Amino acid sequence: MKKCLSLILGTLLFVSCGSEPKLEWVSTTESVPWEARENVAAEQEAVLPDVMIHFDDPQQTIDGFGACFNELGWTSLSVLDVKDREAIMEDLFFPNFGMNFTICRMPVGANDFSRDWYSYDETPGDFEMKHFTIANDKQTLIPFIKNAQRYNPGLSIWASPWSPPTWMKYNKHYACAYTGDWIEEPYRNGLSADSIGAEGSNMFIQEEPYLQAYALYFSKFIEAYKAEGIDIFAVMPQNEFNSCQIFPSCTWTAAGLANFVGNYLGPAMSKQDVEVMFGTMERANYLLVDTALTDPASGKYIKGVGFQWAGKDAVAEIHKKYPDLPLYQSEQECGDGLNNWGGAVHSWNLMKHYLSNGVNAYMYWNISLLEGGISRWGWAQNSLVVVDETTKTYRYTPEYYVMRHVSHYVQPGAKRLATSGDYSDLLAFENPDKSVVVIAGNNAPEDKKVHIQFRDNVYAPTLKANSLNTFLLKK
């Protein structure tokens, strides 16, 4: 009869009895996505682990994973037979089934993946919002969200504008950047060359009647969606407030946003019982965020921060300075419309970066797009689902599987776990039910055996070349 033996020589060495639980294992490569692999038994000989998981050092709590409800997401899914569309929606939103999405974003008015430009009130000077309407959204975003709620009634939704109504902006236009004659129709935005904006400036009119009206605009949005059975739990005041774009956009200074949040939006949202988060932040300069957090007026209202694009390089500093402040990865970088394996590898590296640096929630960008992923303004982007308009068929992309490797297994309330060792291409979590999830990548061109220590056991799966793997150890 074999004896169980453990050995400590500076670093933990391990031996296991054969009755130890096995790891459930799913693997994805470019050619074989989501393959259930043979469960891995604990090692029977003393080995030095490549990865040690520190259960005594829990990190941030995970709120969940999701994506953004965009108009072109709904119009592309609507090309499909209802049965196929419902299968996708069930896969994305039914709890503990497929993607297991629990928290999603939506735009307030038009964004770059809307059918065209619109806002909820384009009547100049309507400071009382008498002409406010969400009629446009009743055709697209509302049925999209309500369809998701059929599968997950508890889905959490937050919102942010890309542009305020045009009459609230100095240039009276939804865009900030000039497309010029070199961009062909229908992608031109009609903005004149003398009406462009610039980073580091306030394009929103910084006068009290406009700021008050814009806070009322947010309140009307919250109330109108609530009347449709959709509760918005949080808002961010501006998508990418430093970015001057050819599509709906509006630059603000950090001080301008702090004033708006502290004296107008914050009080208005408090009356609606809706949280205000700062962002979305798309620059590496963490001081732009800190300006609003340390401002006496705005700081008391800001309950979290959203980061995307180059904002990823500001996350660590904000998390270090405000360790208990909720942080969201608010929009994954969008790719180029090719939806290839390279995009999937980039997505995995982004997830590792954000989650390792303290974010509590992670949002993909486009849920679904037609083949090619072209926006109203001519930008090709990736998506989780690609729809062929001609054949009325769909396929899941490599990035869908990357997201699923994490979101399917990591439950709301999970704690990220610190790890150490020579192998760092991984993330580890402990769910509320005490099950342990490890997502491990192997970006090398050859297979690699990795020894992973889970509490008192070491497991040694051989990861396929260029693969992503999820391991689940149930209590």
Image (spheres, rainbow, N blue to C red):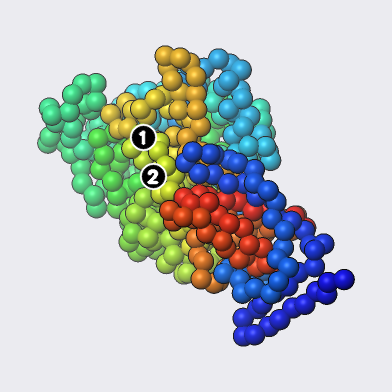
Quarter of the picture containing the C terminus is bottom right
The residues bearing labels 1 and 2 have C-alpha atoms spaced at a distance of 9 Å
Horizontal arrangement in the rendering, residue 130 relative to residue 458 (left or right): left
Q: Secondary structure at mark 2?
A: helix
Identity of the residue furthest to the right in this view: 1
**Amino acid type indicated by mark 1:** Leu
Residue depicted at 33% across the width and 47% down the height: 241
Can residue 213 be seen? no
Q: Secondary structure at mark 1?
A: loop
Horizontal arrangement in the rendering, residue 429 relative to residue 422 (left or right): right
Can residue 38 be seen? yes
**Picture coordinates of residue 336 (x, y %)?**
33, 37
**Amino acid type indicated by mark 2:** Gly
**Front residue of this view, candidates 125 and 408:** 408
**Front residue of this view, candidates 163 and 379:** 379
Near mark 1 (Cα within 10 A), the count class, few <14, some 14-19 or many ≥20, is some
Residue depicted at 68% across the width and 48% down the height: 38
Q: Which residue is mark 2?
A: 342
Residue depicted at 21% across the width and 38% down the height: 177
Horizontal arrangement in the rendering, residue 188 relative to residue 329 (left or right): left
Identity of the residue furthest to the bottom in this view: 10
Task: State the image quarter where residue 370 is shown.
Answer: top left
Near mark 2 (Cα within 10 A), the count class, few <14, some 14-19 or many ≥20, is few
**Front residue of this view, candidates 300 and 180:** 180
**Picture coordinates of residue 84 (x, y %)?**
58, 20
Task: State the image quarter where residue 229 is shown.
Answer: top right
Q: Are marks 1 and 2 in contact (CB under 8 Å)?
A: yes
**Picture coordinates of residue 209 (x, y %)?**
35, 40
Q: Which residue is mark 1?
A: 338
Quarter of the picture containing the N terminus is bottom right
**Picture coordinates of residue 268 (x, y %)?**
50, 44
